[in-house]
Amino acid sequence: MRRMVAGTLLWLAAAGAHATQTLDVLHWWTSLSERQAANSLAGALATEQLAWRDAAIPGGAGVGAFKVLKSRVLSGHAPDVAQLIGPTIGDWAQLGLLLELDDVADDQDWQDRFFPTIWKLSRYSQHVVAVPVGIHRINNLYYRPEVFAEFGLLPPRNWAEFERVAAQLQRAGITPLAQSGEPWQVATLFETLLLSETGPAFYRRLFRLRDPADWQDIRVRRALERLRSLKRWMPQPVAQRSWDEMARGFARGDAAMWVMGDWARGELNSLGLEVDRHFGCTTVPGTAGMHLYSVDTFAMLSGGYVKLRQQEAFARLAASVPVQLAYNRIKGSVPVRRDIDPAQLDPCSRQSWQTFGRGDAVQAPSIVHRMATDEAMKDAIIAQVYRYFSEDQIPAPEVQRRLAAISRALK
Ligand code: GAL
């Protein structure tokens, strides 16, 4: 009997020692490039004998992952690390669920090394509660240079040019603009149009002041109307396809242009396409010099502090210069640090990184990707925009009234 107890204890100790070497990581990176990017982080952990136990939940923009995370936390099976992004990190921190990473941040001087917006996004109530890994830009227009060359076209800089280019392509039997009907993808296109109509100052004001009357502004109406008018350049009917399926379609030549966050660039690279050779990147018309961003961050669930050392190691590694460069090169995003050498980035990434570096005046937080507002308002905007996009008889002012009412109710 005594021997059995001792044996059991030994086994428990061994299991415990083993468990503390593993980090259970919940995220939503399931496409080819996302997997490769996650593997590059896992590879960095492995150099310190830490194993990344994968808990990937499919669904672009984290639509499913957030629900799973909530239910895991509620049922007492929280992961050790979770892809939690945007200001809602604060809600989790407020509940006391997140580990404070102040020691790592001090050691590595995050405050000086990171862009100010990034530093702000990583903190709650004077404490660092998340490690940022990369900055995505969303107002990108990807195009196929060989098609543009064939018809003597230039990438459009404004909407008048866009219309001319699209009409010419359509006349030649080419689908001008790729688009999926998934609600978050429709709303991701919409937010780029909103930025194009309003500019960063008014766009940010919509979420900073939360003044319901702002939703009734003529610029919001124009953005909605632009969204609807773009439908005629899209494949008909606009099918609901995941964004990585869209990337494969674009790579095959299904359409000449595509508006998508730069995770698409990561995916196109992973599919073997090179920027400037097989595809070109520019900004959505009317948004040159602006940066509609989504920042990927990981938070550590405190869970009794049993994995504190390992979680701190994760944060330290993920924020380091070599890991940031290697990971972001695959992911399509750019480092969150100001002290990297931009010569190491490809031309699209360099543009993104340099533009983001100009600060508040050019930055706009993504609605769909959780940077601008809380979950309830984000979900309401996605639902309203999607409904408007799918049902042609709904007038734009009706959507504006609804958004104003929702924003009043949630204020
Ligand atoms: C974003 C996220 C990116 C990318 C994209 C598609 O919210 O920031 O890392 O994965 O969703 O799922």
Image: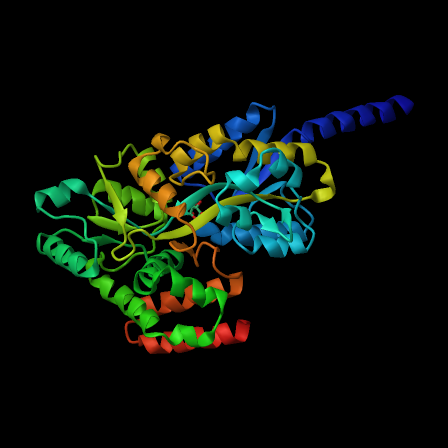
Quadrant into which the N terminus falls: top right
Q: Position of residue 51 (x, y in %)?
A: 59, 29
In which image quadrant can residue 399 be found? Answer: bottom left
Q: Observer-nearest residue: 21 or 145?
A: 145
Q: Position of residue 190 (x, y in %)?
A: 34, 61
Residue 120 visible, this orientation: yes
Please report the residue visible at 26 percent of the width from the left and 66 percent of the height from the top.
226
The image quadrant that residue 203 belongs to is bottom left
Closest to the observer, 165 or 238: 165
In the displayed image of the protein, which residue is found farthest to the right?
2
Quarter-of-image position of residue 363: bottom left
265 relative position to 16: left or right: left
Q: How is the image coloured?
A: rainbow
Residue 396 position, x and y percent, is: 32, 74
Q: Which image quadrant: the C terminus?
A: bottom right
Whether 164 is drawn above or below 253: the answer is below
Numbered disc total = 0
Looking at the image, which residue is at 14% across and 44% down?
147
Would residue 84 be seen by someone viewing this image from the given angle? Answer: no
Name the residue at 62% across, 46% down.
Answer: 129
Locate residue 254, reporting x and y percent: 21, 47
Side of 77 where 65 appears, left or right:
left
